[in-house]
Amino acid sequence: MSAPPHVPPAIERDKPATLLADIVVRDETLELMDGVTYTYWTFNGSVPGPMIRARVGDTLVVRFTNEGMGMPHSIDLHAVTGPGGGAVYTNTFMGGQTAFAFKADKPGLYVYHCATAPMSMHIANGMYGLILVEPEGGLPQVDREYYIMQQELYTEQPFGTRGEATLSYEKLRMEQAEYVVMNGAVTSLRGERGLPVQAGETVRIYFGDAGPNLLSSVHIVGEIMDRVYEWGSLDQWVETVQTIPVPPGGAAVIETTFEVPGTYLLVDHAASRMDKGAVAELVVTGDERPDLFRDLN
């Protein structure tokens, strides 16, 4: 497992194994944007939670510990074949620990999230992540891999109000998001936290939409996606794509090669959401390519 935006290393073994996924619930007050904080309910201290990487045929033992303050929590992994995706066996009160095991029998990129009622509140407070189940032969090698998820936050305070932001369940119920963010914050993947890329490198992005309500129209401004595994399925792909829909609770794998240096924005092309924070930056360095792009001013 690894914290976002980092991805666990590719699996090189050719036989199934038994893996332990230790998931710990913690309440963490984190930066939402400059001057604004929010107390998230987290898996392992980050938003999104850690990315889990497995191989078809692996058995995963999920050990779930609730160190949060007061609320019961659980985990539902969309990669699971079984009741509640595991949530039936992990509804865990403060100070408690539960566990279950499942066999990862279908390859794909899957969302996981808390499923304790009201589920929308738990997801909006940061309880989500991705699990990758690689096919037996693995995925083609690329130069870099990144882990990005989109979510909405529904706060009592208007966007940008300085201080501690707090949840508005009424806005959540009415789907009136104040923030739409990548990796839990307006600033998480921008400026000094932008994702570095070298010109000519092929980058694979594991993208998920946590929701809890809004579909994401994923677009990279100034770049065409070379290959997209739609819906998180690894069985086939489409090529040369401009924008892809990723529904709440869904995922996609994006591969592209950045040939021209510059800062590229990965956005939700429902354009007003960019103003609410739905922007991640990929910072590409390297030699200019006037054969592809040049300034004529």
Image (tube, rainbow, N blue to C red):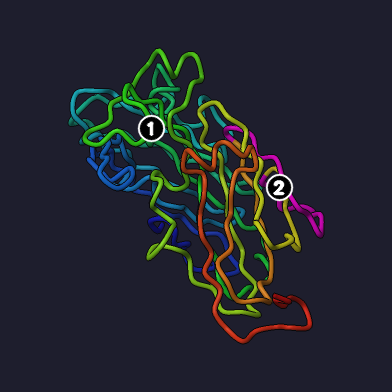
Q: Position of residue 215 (x, y in %)?
A: 62, 33
**Label 1 SS:** loop
Give the numbered dot on residue 233: 2
Q: Is residue 141 above or below residue 69?
A: below
Q: Is residue 126 left or right of residue 207?
A: left
Q: Is residue 4 above or below residue 272?
A: below
| Mark nearer the viewer, 1 or 2 | 1
Residue tagged 1: 159
Q: Is residue 238 magenta?
A: yes
Q: Position of residue 21 (x, y in %)?
A: 39, 49
206 or 36: which is nearer to us? Answer: 36
Q: Quadrant of the C terminus?
A: bottom right
Q: Is residue 283 magenta?
A: no
Q: What's the amino acid at mark 2?
A: Ser
Residue located at (56% from left, 39% from top): 209
Q: Which residues are magenta?
A: 232-249
136 or 164: which is nearer to us? Answer: 164
Give the numbered dot on residue 83: none
Q: Is residue 113 above or below residue 8?
A: above
